Image (spheres, grey):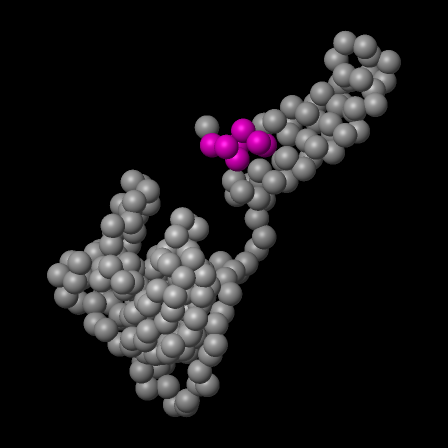
């Protein structure tokens, strides 16, 4: 049983105690403590609910994250490219990487990070690929390195086989709670690099995620 679920159950128990305790009861609960117990129980349920996912803020298709500096869009859009962050940016531990693609583009778009260990880390949110809509794409991008560490942010366009490989790799890493990264030779041959830039961490991000 997860910690968040235990918190929710504890909140329910506190509320039930507060409701069932009669004002003159001497055994179950001091009458003066009924209101604090009830309030504490509600707070625990709300906190546990947000963490566990039973209560959620609707964020549309994309999870919230901070966006960095942004390039101006040059029309007509002729290729897949990153608009934010920009080359040389200092970024937070979690950002929203955003870009554009031409109308004729039909492949999936993946952001892959390459930190100083020279391994490759595909990025995804709940859609498992960058979210595409009306010529723009975006994906949550998470960093786990040291303050000032350089990262190469690489954008690939992929077919269904490469997308499946990246998706399965992320699911396997999540299942073992370990993210060893991919070697260059592990990258699927049908993943085609379309953009690359170097950015730096503004803070120490080790252990954040």
Residue 107 visible: no
User: In the image shown, does 143 or 155 lie closer to the viewer?
Assistant: 143
Rendered residue at 46%/28% (across/down): 1
Q: In this view, does 167 lie above or below 20?
A: below
59 in magenta: no
Residue 57 visible: yes
Which corner quadrant of the image does residue 74 belong to?
bottom left
Q: How many marks?
A: 0
Instruction: Answer left or right for 172 relative to 145.
Output: left
Q: What stretch is highlighted in magenta?
A: 2-8
7 in magenta: yes
Which corner quadrant of the image does residue 22 belong to?
top right
Image location of residue 7, percent across then percent down: 57, 31
Image location of residue 60, percent across then percent down: 53, 60
Instruction: Answer left or right for 179 relative to 202.
Output: left
Q: Is residue 137 above or below residue 188?
A: below
Rendered residue at 29%/45% (across/down): 178
Image location of residue 117, percent across then percent down: 24, 59
Q: Is residue 67 above or below residue 52?
A: below
Instruction: Answer left or right for 112 relative to 7.
Output: left
Q: Is the magenta stretch mostly helix, strand or loop?
A: helix
């Amino acid at each position: 049983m997860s910690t968040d679920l235990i918190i929710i159950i504890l909140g329910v128990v506190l509320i039930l105690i507060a409701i069932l305790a009669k004002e003159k009861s001497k055994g179950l609960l001091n009458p003066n403590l009924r209101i604090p117990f009830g309030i504490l129980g509600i707070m625990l349920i709300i906190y546990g609910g947000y963490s566990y996912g039973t209560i959620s803020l609707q964020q549309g298709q994309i999870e919230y994250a901070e966006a960095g500096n942004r390039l101006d869009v040059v029309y007509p859009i002729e290729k897949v490219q990153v608009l934010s962050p920009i080359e040389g940016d200092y970024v937070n531990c979690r950002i929203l990487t955003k870009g554009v693609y031409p109308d004729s583009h039909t492949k999936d778009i993946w952001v892959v990070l390459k930190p100083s260990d020279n391994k490759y880390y595909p990025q995804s949110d709940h859609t498992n690929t960058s979210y595409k809509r009306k010529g723009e794409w975006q994906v949550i991008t998470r960093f786990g390195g040291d303050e000032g560490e350089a990262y190469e942010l690489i954008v690939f366009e992929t077919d269904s086989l490469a997308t499946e490989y990246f998706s399965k790799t992320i699911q396997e890493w999540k299942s073992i709670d370990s993210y060893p990264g991919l070697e260059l030779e592990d990258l699927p041959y049908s993943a085609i690099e379309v953009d690359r830039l170097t950015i730096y961490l503004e803070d120490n991000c080790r252990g954040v995620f």
